[in-house]
């Protein structure tokens, strides 16, 4: 972001400077405030832990130790809020163990049995180490930078030894006071220029220690949960891909058996009959051969249709929009197509989107009794959205045993999601979201 001042010939970026100054202030107050908080925390946590452990043998120390852990948890909540501004990210608090019963004894032992509560206590005891290191660096850099840059303002009030003119003359300065002022200004300038990285590094040292102690286990658990979820999704996609492939193979086998195979059997029988007729009845043989030729053409048409269902050439050559246009032209129900996607997508995405529309239009033509169907393909930032809606009788389902179950597996195998809204008597709306 840049701001232009009136009458100025150029633009002056002020947002980065403000951002650095704001972060410098945040880091400075984090470190300077963390030192007294750490001092207070180590005293209270060590005292509470010592008293609790020392008197645990007579059972008085058990509730005392639980109270100390709860106190450390309170300090941990405060520190998580403080750390968020330094790390520029929200720190999600962990889930602490709670008592499974409502009894007082269970409530007392709940913090003692919780691992994160002990990590909070350990942080309260050991946080003084990074807090002290960070405080020393930050305090030193601020003091030296300010003292050096403002040295000319108070040089007159400091006692100085008698002037020795040999050094100033050697350096080209008129007197010793000038050398002293330039030297201190140089030191102040160096510390001022290195102030931001030193303060930032000190704050990150303390903040990362707190994050590791107070949220490290929780983040590790979340990463494990995400990895398990990703593994489950991958297994579901693999199972869906296997199921979709098996369904497609069964459908192809059924279509070949019901169509081209029957025609080829009849073609073989017709040719055999024609061979026998050539000797006795040539005219009947010619009619039989002509009928066989017609059967051959019909068989070729069915094989072309099956090949389009496996890998339509127009989809490979000209893309999704052209393939959907051809698909809509062959549908027996009028299709209103809205597919502005012109650029080529990943072949797997294009293939899945094509088969979603193809299967949906096939179901519309066979079962919906619809008078019109609308097909929409929309390119979004997160993926491709394919919608097929008709005004038919409804009743479609993704459940196993229905025609759309195999389509659902195909979409899942591509990493997408398929949804169907099909109330009885109110049409069907099929929506597929595919990642790209």
Image (cartoon, helix red, strand yellow):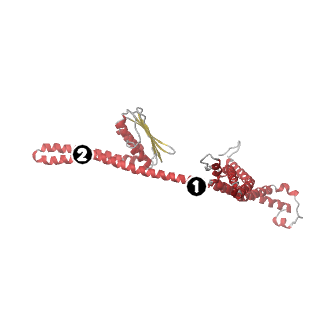
- Which of marks 2 and 1 precedes in the sequence? 1
Position above or below: 409 against 194: above
- Pointer 2 local density, CA inside 10 Å: few below 14, some 14–19, many at least 20: some
Disc number lying in front (1 or 2): 1
- In the picture, measured across the screen, residue 335 lies left or right of residue 436, that is left
Q: Nearer the viewer, residue 308 or 426?
A: 426
Write the residue at 48% across / 50% down: 233
Q: Distance between the residues labelled 1 and 2?
A: 63 Å
Name the residue carrying label 1. Answer: 220
| Residue 432 coordinates in the image, percent (x, y) | 45, 42
| Residue 110 coordinates in the image, percent (x, y) | 63, 51
- In the picture, measured across the screen, residue 193 lies left or right of residue 302, that is right
**1 and 2 marks in contact (CB < 8 Å):** no
Give the farthest residue toward the left. Answer: 280
**Quadrant of the rendered image containing residue 173:** bottom right
- Pointer 1 local density, CA inside 10 Å: few below 14, some 14–19, many at least 20: few
| Residue 403 coordinates in the image, percent (x, y) | 37, 42
Q: Nearer the viewer, residue 250 or 180?
A: 250
Give the farthest residue toward the right. Answer: 162
Write the residue at 84% across / 66% down: 167
Q: Nearer the viewer, residue 319 or 347?
A: 347
Mark yes or no: residue 171 visible: yes
Give the farthest residue toward the front. Answer: 58
Dot 1: element: helix
- In the picture, measured across the screen, residue 132 lies left or right of residue 254, that is right
Write the residue at 80% across / 60% down: 184
Q: Nearer the viewer, residue 222 or 21?
A: 222
Dot 2: element: helix
Name the residue carrying label 2. Answer: 263
């Amino acid at each position: 972001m840049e701001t232009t001042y009136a009458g100025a010939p150029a633009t002056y970026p002020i947002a980065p400077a403000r951002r650095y100054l704001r972060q410098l202030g945040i880091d400075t107050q984090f470190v300077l405030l963390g030192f007294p908080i750490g001092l207070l925390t180590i005293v209270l946590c060590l005292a509470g832990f010592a008293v609790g452990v020392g008197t645990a043998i007579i059972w008085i120390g058990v509730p005392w130790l639980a109270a100390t852990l709860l106190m450390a948890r309170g300090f941990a909540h405060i520190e998580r809020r403080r750390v968020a501004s330094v790390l520029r990210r929200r720190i999600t608090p962990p889930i602490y163990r709670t008592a499974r019963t409502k009894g007082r004894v269970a409530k007392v032992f709940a913090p003692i049995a919780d691992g994160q509560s002990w990590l909070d206590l350990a942080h309260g005891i050991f946080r003084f180490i990074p807090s002290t290191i960070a405080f020393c660096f930050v305090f030193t850099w601020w003091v030296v930078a300010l003292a050096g840059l403002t040295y000319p303002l108070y040089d007159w009030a400091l006692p100085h030894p008698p002037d020795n003119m040999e050094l100033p003359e050697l350096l080209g300065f008129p007197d010793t006071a000038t050398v002293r002022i330039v030297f201190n200004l140089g030191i102040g300038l160096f510390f001022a220029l290195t102030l931001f990285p030193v303060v930032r590094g000190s704050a990150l040292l303390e903040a990362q220690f707190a994050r590791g102690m107070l949220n490290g286990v929780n983040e590790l658990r979340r990463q494990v949960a995400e990895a398990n979820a990703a593994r489950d999704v991958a297994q579901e996609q693999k199972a869906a891909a296997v199921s979709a492939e098996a369904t497609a193979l069964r459908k192809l086998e059924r279509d070949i058996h019901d169509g081209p195979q029957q025609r080829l059997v009849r073609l073989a029988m017709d040719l055999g009959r024609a061979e026998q007729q050539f000797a006795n009845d040539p005219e009947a043989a010619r009619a039989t051969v002509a009928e066989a030729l017609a059967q051959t053409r019909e068989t070729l048409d069915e094989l072309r249709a099956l090949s389009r269902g496996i890998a339509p050439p127009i989809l490979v050559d000209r893309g999704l929009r052209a393939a959907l246009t051809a698909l809509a032209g062959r549908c027996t129900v009028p299709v209103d197509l809205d597919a502005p996607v012109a650029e080529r997508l990943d072949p797997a995405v294009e293939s899945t989107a094509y088969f979603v529309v193809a299967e949906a239009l096939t179901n519309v033509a066979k079962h919906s009794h619809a008078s019109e169907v609308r097909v929409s393909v929309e390119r979004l930032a997160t993926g491709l959205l394919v919608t097929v809606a008709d005004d038919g009788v409804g009743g479609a389902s993704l459940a196993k045993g229905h025609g759309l179950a195999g389509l659902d597996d195909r979409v899942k195998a591509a990493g997408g999601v398929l949804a169907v809204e099909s109330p009885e008597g109110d049409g069907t709306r099929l929506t597929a979201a595919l990642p790209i």
